């Protein structure tokens, strides 16, 4: 061994080394340190080179193993290489030792680098496939939500009208009320699907996330119960973000509820905020991340944690690990959609049995915090204006028209954009155009632009079961545009109509 060490030192190395002469000693050495190279004699008292090689292949297969011996013949040396040794050096030819060590260390480094690159590539491929899968599910969810909302708009509209006609004490009123409430609850489920598919209509404003967390903290403590300790760690110099206040509160609530369910026996739940700068290197490893200054919201629990297989599917709508009857499987998919539509990203860090952390990154803004917008509520929801109603779904159109007529409006119905244009080219003047957003042949926005050239003073109100981002920029409603999400109660429609007709 002294000859080997002398050769390495003369070759410019200052090795940290340990000599072992038994399997037990070698196991201990491998346990306490990560060795870059193993040099082994072939014949040792009570221990042999092949035995050491077999142990090394089990414990550290990536570490180069080189036989250095004065007794091994060429046939045995070749057998050792076939068994996994990287090379062999005869003690009477130690001039080969330093070049062999240099080569093996360099090749080991290259193998490690290739493995890192391959692992990153495999991770990127898995994330790309998952992203494509989520995008496809999102398109399906948006289509399902649109169709359901159209049907729910009919149920909510007619049940609302029947309720208005049903006197207190009528035995049918309770049944009608249940129908109406079921329609609105179903509408909430479709809104969660819209959130996942990034089709919500958002009303973003600049806010301080710390204030949002503080304002909902009392409610969160009631939600999680007394057996879970809620800890907040809020950065005192937190930057500002531009999001829909109601939707970011929904994100916090959904994540807190998910964390609570992961700690049935109690635990600690931590809400943390911080300023972070996501650089290009981070963005390269995390698809959809845009480099730059962000505000981070982290929600951490010390509960059950998740396996890698569950983590891959956790944001899919209707995927849940909870027993039947506990949740819809839409909570985390809603979080994913709201954050992505708000220009941010959400990342999950979890380990089975050790807890979970969700990190939300939202772009920072230099704009000043804006106050909540307030729309005065009119006490008189009736009107006598003339309304052009454009809706390609006949049942929805009839229900909406019935509600409008009940509130006193004169309604002309059109089953599509082309018919609406033909009507506007006639002599009849309209005060308001109510149009669905997505229709065959022409969008509601394109229709509004065409009609506005014929009737510049015509007010516009959009309705939809879902919202296309080409109409509403990233979900934010442009100034001056009125929108009503299906399904809606008759009173909500009447109120929105009055808002749209309000003098400018």
Image: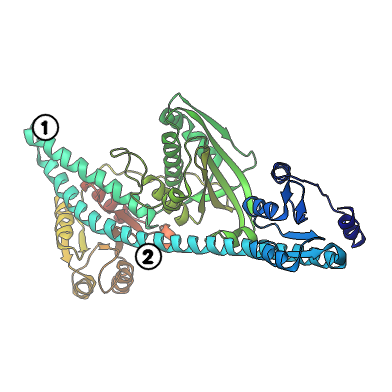
161 sits to left or right of 227: left
| Residue closest to the far left | 171
Q: Earlier in the sequence, mark 2 or mark 1?
A: 1
Q: Nearer the viewer, residue 136 or 121?
A: 121
Residue at figure coordinates x 62%, y 52% from the top left: 58
Secondary structure, mark 1, is loop
Q: Is residue 479 visible?
A: no
x 49%, y 41%: residue: 352
Q: Position of residue 76 (x, y in %)?
A: 71, 64
SS at mark 2 in the image: loop
**Can the viewer see residue 144 in this picture?**
yes
Residue projecting furthest to the top:
226
Point out residue 312 in the picture as x, y percentages from the top left corner: 45, 53
State the separation of the CA atoms marked 2 and 1: 43 Å
How would you rate the neighbour count of disc 1 (Cα within 10 Å): few for under 14, some for 14-19, many for 20 or more?
few
Q: Is residue 221 above or below residue 472?
A: above
Q: In this view of the protein, which residue sits in the foreground, 24 or 223?
A: 24
Q: Is residue 282 depicted above or below 168 in this figure?
A: below
Check disc 2 and report the residue beneath it: 471
Q: Which residue is mark 1?
A: 168
Quadrant in which residue 394 is drawn: bottom left
């Amino acid at each position: 061994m002294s000859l080997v060490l002398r050769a390495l030192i003369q070759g410019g190395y200052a090795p940290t080394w340990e000599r072992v002469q038994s399997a037990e000693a070698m196991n201990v050495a491998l346990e306490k340190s990560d060795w870059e190279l193993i040099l082994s004699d072939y014949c040792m008292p009570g221990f042999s080179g092949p035995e050491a090689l077999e142990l090394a292949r089990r414990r550290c297969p990536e570490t180069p193993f080189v036989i250095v011996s004065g007794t091994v013949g060429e046939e045995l040396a070749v057998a050792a290489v076939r068994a996994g040794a990287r090379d062999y050096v005869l003690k009477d030819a130690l001039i080969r030792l330093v070049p062999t060590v240099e080569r093996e260390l360099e090749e080991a480094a290259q193998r490690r680098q290739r493995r890192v690159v391959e692992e990153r590539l495999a991770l990127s491929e898995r994330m790309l496939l998952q992203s494509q899968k989520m995008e496809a599910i999102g398109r399906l969810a948006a289509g399902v939500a649109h169709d359901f909302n159209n049907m729910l708009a009919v149920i909510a509209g007619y049940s609302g009208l029947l309720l208005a006609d049903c006197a207190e004490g009528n035995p049918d009123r309770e049944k009608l009320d249940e129908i109406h409430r079921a329609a609105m609850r179903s509408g909430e489920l479709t809104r969660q699907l819209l959130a996942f598919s990034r089709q919500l209509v958002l009303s973003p404003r600049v806010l301080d996330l710390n204030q949002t967390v503080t304002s909902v903290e009392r409610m969160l403590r009631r939600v999680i119960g007394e057996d879970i300790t809620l800890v907040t760690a809020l950065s005192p110099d937190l930057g500002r973000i531009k999001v829909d206040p109601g939707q970011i509160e929904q994100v916090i609530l959904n994540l807190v509820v998910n964390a609570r369910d992961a700690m049935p026996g109690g635990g600690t739940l931590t809400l943390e905020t911080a300023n972070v700068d996501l650089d290009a290197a981070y963005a390269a490893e995390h698809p959809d991340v845009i480099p730059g200054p962000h505000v981070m919201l982290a929600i951490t629990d010390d509960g059950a944690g998740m396996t890698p297989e569950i983590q891959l599917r956790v944001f899919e709508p209707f995927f849940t690990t909870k027993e039947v009857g506990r949740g819809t499987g839409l909570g985390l998919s809603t979080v994913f959609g709201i954050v992505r539509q708000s220009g941010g990203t959400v990342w999950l860090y979890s380990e089975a049995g050790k807890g979970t952390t969700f990190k939300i990154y939202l772009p920072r803004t230099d704009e000043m915090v804006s106050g909540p917008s307030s729309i005065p509520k009119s006490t008189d929801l009736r009107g006598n204006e003339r309304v052009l109603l454009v809706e390609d779904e006949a049942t929805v159109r009839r229900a909406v028209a019935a509600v409008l007529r009940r509130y006193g409006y004169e309604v002309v119905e059109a089953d599509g954009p082309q018919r609406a244009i033909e009507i506007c080219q006639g002599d009849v003047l309209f005060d308001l155009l109510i149009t669905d957003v997505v229709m065959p042949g022409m969008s509601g926005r394109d229709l509004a632009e065409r009609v506005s050239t014929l009737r510049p003073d015509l007010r516009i109100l959009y309705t939809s079961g879902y919202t296309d981002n080409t109409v509403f920029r990233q979900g934010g409603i442009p100034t001056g545009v009125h929108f009503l999400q299906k399904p809606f109660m008759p009173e909500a429609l009447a109120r929105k109509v009055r808002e749209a007709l309000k003098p400018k």
